[in-house]
């Protein structure tokens, strides 16, 4: 796939003295697995499109031989690496023939594999992971017959989320997403943002069943799957996908005494060398440094695999190159939103032992006067001592992903919230505000740490024992009220009415998105009030989350 | 505006001991001047929208007093700064009254002013710069009457380009853009990209008159303007905008012995302090370090002004903060494209004495199989010794701007092409490819410098004395032929047909966007051929540029 094909092609390009062979267990090479949901969704006509070059030529054996100068052996499994003899023992899966190939340098790029369920499930064409082209093709064959009206997706990670869109958008399949964690995408988003994302899933055909594990899957009398949940529910469906994540595929490596790390991936140095001489590893099967935690971690991102493959090739060819690690920048399109993140969630940062601070914000992606302005919601996580950046999560309908790229660049150099405040961006009203969300998050974090202007998570509202003060304009309060009991003092009146607020009770300010309540907090703190804070993301975020949670409760 | 209002508001927030006054010569404060083209174009109903907060409250004197705690004096000009007495001498423009205000700290945030033409022009409501709200409002009043059918825009910089869209899109005004340089946006784009951009201007109502200076503007018998060009042409129009750029407005500063720099802006240190004690400067009127050249330069960007204002406030308040400089990240929406750049063009880099290298590329912004994939064209400029990054220019219909933000971050730390190759990005087929344009540009530059895989600018094609080899598939060659005499050898056949190419003649490879011809160059160099190169941006870019140039020639 990405790492193997990339390394092979580059090696062949670098010198004509290299003879490069790719050994692939399956029937395909070099397809875009990230495009499989698009194929399943019917947005791409053929799985072949994912195996083609930009100019419509299939990336098959002939292509690799003629264009790349690389020999391909498909349907061929490596049974063993005989490292002391610099040989691999291969077996052609169709014919069962075995043979031995010698090597000077060996690259292990065995990728990742879908995690299999711990619960029992039937062997059925209608119960499947979503990992390989055949998983996608099998579903699509059945879906095209119109015989899938209801589906269950088990797992609310990235692939599971992509599947709910793939199933509902074109096919109109009623879909239940079952996730044992309390929230979607809990590995990449903290609950405030997961909740917001969940509330954005507008399709009426999607049902979320959260905080519920799967007990098992049976088949009914017609051979259709029935999913039993741990809470006793049983869901009959025409199709079940289990999307339980992936893990490094390192069976072969481990059999061959190649050392793997804590996350289960192959340990490599910055030149992608493994513990065994003349053996390299790259891609999903390898562990690389997480720029934030400095721990080794296996990522499963095509972009990183590509770059690792390039570095492995350079290293094998004796050229200077290094892969220094990753910030884990990740992105997902889910219905009308783009969700993206890099670094650690606050939850995960605390698991790593960091003393964290965080701020939550909400902005327009353009000046509000622009007719195309869209909402962005974000959360920044940082380390309190030293104010080093730890993670960022953004959700928006507009351009948000590349902000994550900027943030990743900052993470890769251990930058602080001051650097975030100073990040330069190209501004034009067509796609940004004069102050970028990154700058705002930096400013908010700085104010919180330097001046005690506390940004409060919407999830902390229920526990708050003080006075909520809504500083919006009367018309705004009337149209979308803040759902909790609150005092209304428009920001413009605050200075003259500060005395109305009991100086002995904590005050939390509310506005639409955050900026005004931030200012109000400053005003109150300046007046000598000691316990003032503001609601991060404002009423916009809180209202959405609250309404959605109530719907969830009513629903269940 | 941005710097002044930002600094004033922040100062007032930081301590209640500060009494902050803004003195403004004009009738407005704190409006979004970057939004003026949208108002002129009719996309925004009222110029008031540009002076409003996100929640619809006008940012007027009352707002600043009540909400920000800042006193505003409109229509008031500062005639002199009496620095030795810490006073400013003010004059109310309407009433003519003069008065003196004392200060502890003074911030000069006088912004920039439109450059006035060197040629003669009439005093007419139909001949105007495009700089202030009244410029925009005056045009709109006349345009709404339907009495502007033809307009001339003088100046092909950012504002001039925005104006041609504003004039043609909604109002349908036939517009001639007159630019004395050979190309549009020549300060931010090298000619390859300017030409591409020009070819993208699809509106039939836009006529470009390039390489032509204006001799003068007269009025005809009905009082309508007639523009005389240096080449003898005379263009009668209903409206003329001159958009000749801006320069720092430093009259007051200079009168007060505040030192200005080479670019005409006020010299400041990293805390925005001027040469005179107790006087700061921020925004368009100040000079800051250009991260690339290390020279002082005045930028005219709302985003930078905002951040400068914040730093000035912090500095005045005795807090730690610094503004370290700018990469000059800039962006423009022009019809369906976004144009953005940071750092230096190759032309400008050479003027600064850098020994430059550059590569030009063309990509899809997403995998080609994605139904929404759009073209991006880019040029990277770097310094040959040390391979330091100098500049990047990108044009695309999709998400391109934030790539410039990432690049700006790299520029701000003197990064090299190796760092560009390693830049991490969040990948999902909905908005990016597994290898980002930034990575590709880094790879291409690295190959050019390390292995001599030369990337040739489309503008160098006419001077090339060798064999063009088109390595595309037959169908592609048939549908959009490379316009020069060329040999056709599909990439897949190249290895077996290398001998057909005369080893003593230089070869330039062509493909659709670049990647295949890059590979072909590698193949030929490996085979021992010494003079091989590939066409940057491929036939896609070349064909567009060539066709467009021919149209230009036919037209003129």
Image: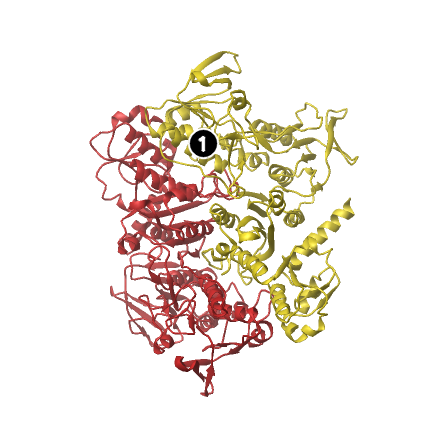
Chain colours: A yellow, B red
On screen, A51 above or below A504?
above
Q: How many marks?
A: 1
The structure residue drawn at horizontal position 66% and vertical position 25%, both measured from the top left corner, is: A125
Residue B445 in the image, given as x and y percentages of width and height = 34, 41
Can residue B521 be spotted in the picture? yes
Quick one: which residue is furthest to the right in this view?
Answer: A232
Residue A144 at x, y percent in the picture: 62, 31
Instruction: Look at 25% across and 26% down and name the residue there.
Output: B500
Please say if A375 is above or below A201.
below
Asked if one can make out residue B481 in the rendered structure from this viewpoint, the answer is no
**Residue topped by disc 1:** A272
Please tell me which residue lies in front, A461 or A141.
A461
**Which chain letter goes with mark 1?**
A
Query: Relative to A475, does residue A455 appear above or below in the rendering?
Result: above
- In the orientation shown, which residue stands out farthest toward the front? A385
Horizontally, is A174 left or right of B166 in the view? right
Q: Secondary structure at mark 1?
A: loop
Residue A244's quadrant in the figure? top right
């Amino acid at each position: 796939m990405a790492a193997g094909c990339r390394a092979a092609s580059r090696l062949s390009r670098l010198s004509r003295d290299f003879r490069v062979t790719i050994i692939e267990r399956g029937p395909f090479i070099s397809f875009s697995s990230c495009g499989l949901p698009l194929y399943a969704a019917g947005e791409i006509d053929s799985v072949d499109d994912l195996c083609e070059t930009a100019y419509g030529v299939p990336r098959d054996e002939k292509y690799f031989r003629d264009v790349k100068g690389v020999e391909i052996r498909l349907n061929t499994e490596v049974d063993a690496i005989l490292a002391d003899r610099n040989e691999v023992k291969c077996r052609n899966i169709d014919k069962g023939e075995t043979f031995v190939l010698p090597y000077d340098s060996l690259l292990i790029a065995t990728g990742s594999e879908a995690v299999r369920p711990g619960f029992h499930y039937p062997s059925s064409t209608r119960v499947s992971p979503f990992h390989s082209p055949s998983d996608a093709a099998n579903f699509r064959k059945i879906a095209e017959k119109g015989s899938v009206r209801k589906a269950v997706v088990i797992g609310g990670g990235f692939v599971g989320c992509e599947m709910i869109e793939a199933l509902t958008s074109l096919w109109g399949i009623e879909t239940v997403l079952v996730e044992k964690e309390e929230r979607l995408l809990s590995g990449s988003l903290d609950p405030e943002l997961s909740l917001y994302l969940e509330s954005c899933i507008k399709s009426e055909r999607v049902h979320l069943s959260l905080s519920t594990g799967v007990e098992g899957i049976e088949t009914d009398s017609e051979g259709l799957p029935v999913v039993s949940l741990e809470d006793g529910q049983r869901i009959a469906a025409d199709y079940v996908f289990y999307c339980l994540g992936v893990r490094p595929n390192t069976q072969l490596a481990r059999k061959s005494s190649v050392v793997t790390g804590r996350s289960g991936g192959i340990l490599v140095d910055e030149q992608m060398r493994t513990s065994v001489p003349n053996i390299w590893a790259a891609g999903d099967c390898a562990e690389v440094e997480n720029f934030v935690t400095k721990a080794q971690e296996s990522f499963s991102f095509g972009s990183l695999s590509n770059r690792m493959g390039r570095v492995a090739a350079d290293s094998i060819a004796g050229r200077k190159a290094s892969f220094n690690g990753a910030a884990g920048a990740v992105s997902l399109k889910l219905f009308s939103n783009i969700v993206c993140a890099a670094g650690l969630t606050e939850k995960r940062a605390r698991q790593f032992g960091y003393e964290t601070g965080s701020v939550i914000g909400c902005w327009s992606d353009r000046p509000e006067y622009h007719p195309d302005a869209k909402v962005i919601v974000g959360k920044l996580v940082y380390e309190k001592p030293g104010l080093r950046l730890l993670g960022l999560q953004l959700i928006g309908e507009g351009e948000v992903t590349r902000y994550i790229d900027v943030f990743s660049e900052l993470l890769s150099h251990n930058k602080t919230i001051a650097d975030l405040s100073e990040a330069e961006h190209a501004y034009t009203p067509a796609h940004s505000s004069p102050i970028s969300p990154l700058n705002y998050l930096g400013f908010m974090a700085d104010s919180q740490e330097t001046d005690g202007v506390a940004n409060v998570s919407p999830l902390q509202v229920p526990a708050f024992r003080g006075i909520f003060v809504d500083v919006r304009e009367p018309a705004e309060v009337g149209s979308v009220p803040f759902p909790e009991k609150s005092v209304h003092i428009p920001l413009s009146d605050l200075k003259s009415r500060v005395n109305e607020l009991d100086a002995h009770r904590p005050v939390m300010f509310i506005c639409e998105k955050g900026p005004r309540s931030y200012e109000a907090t400053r005003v109150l703190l300046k007046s000598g009030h000691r316990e003032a804070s503001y609601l991060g993301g404002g009423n916009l975020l809180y209202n959405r989350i609250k309404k959605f949670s109530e719907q969830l409760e009513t629903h269940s």
